[in-house]
Image (cartoon, helix red, strand yellow):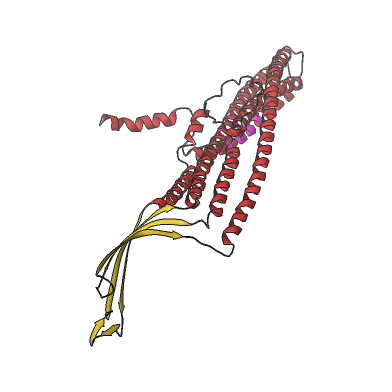
Amino acid sequence: MKFLLLLPCLALAAQAAPLSLEDACRRSLVLPPRLQAARARVERSQAAEREIETAWNPRLGLDGNYTYTTPNAVFQQQGQSIVFSQNHNYLVTLRLTQLLWDGGLYTSRQQARQWQVVIAEERERELRLDLQQESALAFLEAKSAEHGLALNHQELTQRQAQLGQSRLLFAKGTVARYDIMRSEAEVARVQQEIIESQRRLELRRNNLASLLSMEVSELTDLPQPGAPQPAVTEDLQQRPDMKIAQLALHEADARLEAARAENSPLLNFQTDYQQRNGTVSFPSQQWNTGVVLSWPLYDQGLSQTRAQQVEAELKELQAQALEVQRLALLEVKQLRTDMLARYSAWQAAQVQSRAAEEAARVAMVRYQNGLSTQVERLEAEVNAFRAGREQVGLRYQLAAAEARYKRALGQEQIP
């Protein structure tokens, strides 16, 4: 009972806990509708595979019929009438059939269905990777907006402090009233930027909350990025689209073999028990056992044209597999180049931000001592804030580039 009372508290604590990038990626896989649909397609493929397997199961059927015949078949012999048939006739047959040999038809069809199951499972994995990437990018966009809003508030605090200092200096007669008006304009500008940043943050949080099906409040900070790993030969075979292209070739091969085996003979074991009204020709009960050979000798070229269609489809899939490989290799190279460039830009932005902050500090000291103007001080501070904002933006752009690169390699976003 106490545990049940603690459940709402635990739920509130879980909701209040900051959301990390890894948590967002995990949460994106908690049965979203798109993933449920992919799982249903896998189950449908598995059911289709089991359907083919039933061809080798024994079949038991019951047939019954009734006929009224007139006149009766009568044979005259030595003045006596022997009746071969009756007016009212019925026949009930219980039949058992077992497939013994199919010429490779059902075996090839079963192999094709097995490949279809593997393809459906790979498409589900592809969707999981897409969902993780989508959630990771949404998290980074929301965190970037949150960080931008924090920088705006920090700038507002600094601008308000500078406005108060300008007023004090004006009261002492050190600076002109223009400095106060310029500081007031800067405060108003930052306040407008805060409104825009709040709107942007709300929109991006709504997008993230929709993807994760949960309310989003606080987001954890990202760890400092490490240097990218040295270039290696990427294993493109882990990409879902590469695997699907190869699996489609195997599935088409199996369907081609099945199409070529459509005219193969079928051998069945069959036994039946019959119950009827007895006559001179047929007893009332009868048991029949034997084998049945079915061989379609001519189908007007139907099976041949079906095989030709699958052959053409196989050629198309082979060409598509080569194109998928080319595009995958290009995408991986492009994304790695983009990731390395953003890492270098982020490193350069760090140096620029530190230099701009030092220049702003020096400009403030000079202004306080009457060695520079308000314009020089504001320009240095604006440059420092711009450099800091650019550094933050490049940090999140680098994280987004890393997420896209992982997806291009077919890797999970969660370590």
* Residue 132 placement: quadrant: top right
Whole-percent x, y for residue 85 in the image: 28, 79
Q: Is residue 193 magenta?
A: yes
Q: Is residue 244 magenta?
A: no
Image quarter in which the N terminus is found = top left
Let me know if residue 139 appears in the view.
yes
Whole-percent x, y for residue 25 in the image: 51, 32
* Residue 330 placement: quadrant: top right
Let me know if residue 384 appears in the view.
no
Front residue of 209/375: it is 209
Front residue of 363/108: it is 108
The answer to whether residue 216 is left or right of residue 271 is right
Q: Residue at x 45, y 48 (%)?
A: 49
Q: Main secondary structure of the magenta part?
A: helix
Q: Residue at x 28, y 83 (%)?
A: 75
Whole-percent x, y for residue 256 in the image: 57, 50
The answer to whether residue 57 is left or right of residue 91 is right
Above or below, comparing residue 263 to residue 192 in the picture: below
- Magenta extent: 189-199
